Image (spheres, rainbow, N blue to C red):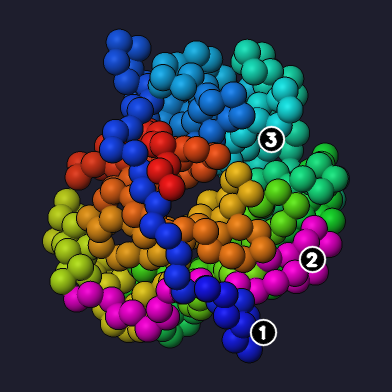
Amino acid sequence: MLTLLAGVLIQVAAPAWRLAPSAVAIGEGRDAVEFLRIGSVQLLPDGSLLVANGEPAELGRFDARGRLTVRMGRAGEGPGEFRRLGWAGQIADTIFGYDHMLRRLTRFTPGGRLISVVRTGGDAGFDAGVSGRLACGGAWHGRPGQGLGRPGAKGPQREPDSAFVVSADLGRVLTRIGPFPGITEITIPMGQGGAMVGIARIAHTTLSGAADSLVYTMDTATPELKLWDCDGRLLRTVRVPIPVDRLIPKQVLVRLRDAATASVPAERRAPIEAMYTSANLPNTLPTVRSIVAGAGQLWVEQYEADPRAESIWWVMDHAGRILGTLRSPAGFRIRSVGAVQVAGVLTDAEGVESVRTYGVMR
């Protein structure tokens, strides 16, 4: 059922979708691949999977059965090398990998041959990170480089953030959408009168990304998802049916704090413990943890503070209609969605990462 409330489209009932009972394990077996700090996972049109691995820094292409078929790049700073991979994907017959530390986009053939390397900003000198491809004019979605605030501010603060539409050659910003409230930052005491600025635990932020010819943004302190065209015009606002007044569970907070300090010497625990005090935490949970675009849909993941909890997803089309809801297993984060399956990263209790694909049952 669709309801219009104060100009905002709302739908509160949707059919339940399910993941298939079993998953395809990626990069396991005889030619096992070790994953660590995975930057992105992308389902490709032919059913294969592209994984941007953090360590070792390389792109891996896997077939539908999960077997490694092509390696692209390696650790380093030369042509075809990476320091920290973020977004990766395929457009037409070209593989792209974005290194957000070196601020450059590397192009490969599907077979792994290096084509070119382009640095973000060109002669324009702006500092924006690529996080997705837009279908309008071959442009890119980007975000400015993260810059932490200054020590001394009392309580959580949110620095401004924006979304960019960047030209195909990465040389200039075509459209700037925002500014929005960015990620929550706090000042952390460091002893002997010192302090540093860090990102708050359970932080509110503004999420943004590319979805075909749309840019989406969502301030996770609210339930409102905004959809913009490539010229920065607001097309519609959709209210995702997630409560905004959910309190942070105390038992979960204690568990997170204890896990963060478990291997830290006693004399160095105070700054970490300070991040879990009420003065440095929001009053309520963020509404949303992540948004994944694909197959003409937006998958919105409800925020849960407990890493052992399953994830609840709200699936909607670009008109804002909610198509279904889905629950994914604890520890499994969906990172890419296709017409009939999803792919994501599974993190076990020891923090070991692996990649899985699941069919979607509607």
Q: Which percent across, then down, holds residue 178? A: 71, 71
Magenta region includes residue 233: yes
Tell me the number on the disc at residue 105.
Answer: 3
Residue drawn at x 78%, y 61% is 229
Residue to which mark 1 is pinned: 7
Can residue 1 be seen in this snapshot? yes
Q: Which percent across, then down, holds residue 232? A: 79, 66
* Foreground disc of the pair 1, 2: 1
Q: Which percent across, then down, holds residue 113? A: 66, 14
Tell me the number on the disc at residue 232.
Answer: 2
* The quadrant where residue 270 appears: bottom left
Between the residue at mark 3 and the residue at mark 2, the CA separation in whole angstroms equals: 24 Å
Residue drawn at x 67%, y 21% is 108
Name the side, left or right, on which 124 lies relative to 324.
right
* Magenta-colored segment: predominant secondary structure: loop
Hey, which residue is sitting farthest bottom in the picture? 6
Above or below, comparing residue 171 to residue 226 in the picture: above
Q: Badge 2, how many Cα within 10 Å: few under 14, some, many 20+?
A: some
